Image: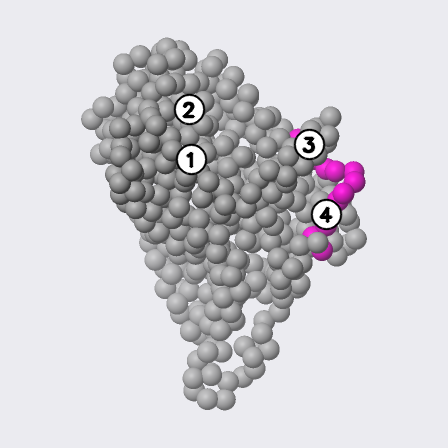
Amino acid sequence: MLEKFGERCERLVRSYMPDPFVLVLLLTIFTFGLALWFTPSRPHELLSHWNLGFWELLSFAMQMVLIVVTGEAIAEARPVRRFIQKLTALPGSATSALLGLTFFSIVLGWLHWGFGLVMASLAGRELAKSLNQRKITAHYPLIGAAAYTSMLLWHAGTTASAPLLINTPGHFLFKEIGLIPLSETVFLPLNLLVCGAIALVVPFVIVQLEPRRGVRTIDEFAADLGTALKTRVFDHEAEEKGKTFAEKLERSYLVNAVVGVFGAVFLIHYFRLEGLNLNHNIVNFLLLSVGMILHRNPMSYARAVARSVKGTSGIILQFPFYGGIMGVMRESGLGHEIANVFVRLASGETLPLYAYLSSVLMKFFIPSGGGEWAVEGPVMLQAAKSLGAPVGLTTMGIAYGNMVGNMFQPFWAIPLLSIMGLKARDIMGYCLVIFFFVFPILAVALWKG
């Protein structure tokens, strides 16, 4: 049953879903139209809002580029590659591979969304290569969808934007709601129960989506994967002994080791002071330091990064446009208008559920968890205060909508697609099935919670 449903969703997405860049352009035009119709903003004001937001995600885009290229650089290091080859050789069938990859991706994404996304992507690619080399037929797009489940529970995990923000002293809603501890959000027993159930069940849903015909192995994606499909070795030039002083420096492991140790010492100091408080910069610094230590010389590391950068064009191009959409939604008041529609329908008992439904809708326009929270959070939490609804559960309603929306919004798939050499339409049909499966589970949890 699920296999046929998956095939229908896959055909639907393949036929009607445009390239993610075209999608963000269409969403930009649609957002302008909605803002003109439902808010008093004038066209020139909307253009100013668009320009204001357009540049807000530049630093974030650079962080995402770095997390992709530094993660891939680690995977290209010889010791890591050997370890990955041994690990990916363990599954003896496509089914066991999908089960293991999906569970691994969900759990890692719950622990840290950025690190989980890039590691799940790399694991999926290398797993597919291992299966292919052992003549085990596996549907590569479904492997990509399994890896993308790393974004399924991220906003209910330890790096969730909204719950962490309202647990931070002096946050922008501190005067209205005070501090909301993680025991009322991420570590709420209901949330842990729901996350555990989804992490155990979704891998079996993925397995049921395995197609019996029309299987597309990783070989079909060789052109987009390029040299990543092959087993790489260090460049011959980087292996030769340098003749001049400059060449010796370029091929010296000592340079890598010293810089890597600098990073390691800083990270030890940081974790002693802050604990396991991971943010994007710390994750990137960790990946960079580990990569420098694992590569045999600076040029080997530089070439690994250079090869990976070619696949990050989607991040560089699309993130500013989503920032522009976010600017229009926030500054025009359109985001507040959408949220208020759901608030007017809610009571104290049902507000978390309506916050969830509102968040799912908002996901089309603002895929960033932090960006959506900035637009929707104030409206919903003020409503929670006036209606007597639980603030923590209302926050989780917004978080749930944002995270399950990843299964139909391809924004966060961009880094994964660059690593795995896939297109959004290759995986989003299967992700849509996961959305239809998980959406009612979260709705019932919030309704009964």
Q: Picture quarter containing residue 9?
A: top right
**Residue 211 magenta-drawn?**
yes
User: In this orientation, which residue lies closer to the viewer: 328 or 75?
Assistant: 328
Residue with the mark numbered 1: 30
Label 3: state its secondary structure: helix
Q: Earlier in the sequence, mark 4 or mark 1?
A: 1
Which disc is residue 358 wearing?
Answer: 2
Q: Do the residues bearing badges 3 and 4 touch, measured as CB atoms within 8 Å? A: no
Q: Is residue 145 above or below residue 247?
A: above
Nearest-to-viewer mark from 3 and 2? 3
Which kind of residue does numbered mark 4 sit on?
A: Arg
Q: Give whichever of 181, 113 is nearer the camera.
A: 113
Q: Which residue is mark 4?
A: 216
Q: Position of residue 237 (x, y in %)?
A: 56, 79
Q: Which residues are magenta?
A: 205-219
The x, y position of residue 437, in whole percent, is 60, 26
> Crowding at label 3, few (<14), some or many (≥20) Cα neighbours within 10 Å?
some
Q: Name the residue that disc number 3 marks.
A: 8
* Marks 1,2: beta carbons within 8 A: no
> Of callouts 3 and 1, which one flags the residue occurring earlier in the amino acid sequence?
3
In the rendered view of the protein, which quadrant contains the C terminus? top left
Could you tell me the amino acid type at mark 2?
Ser
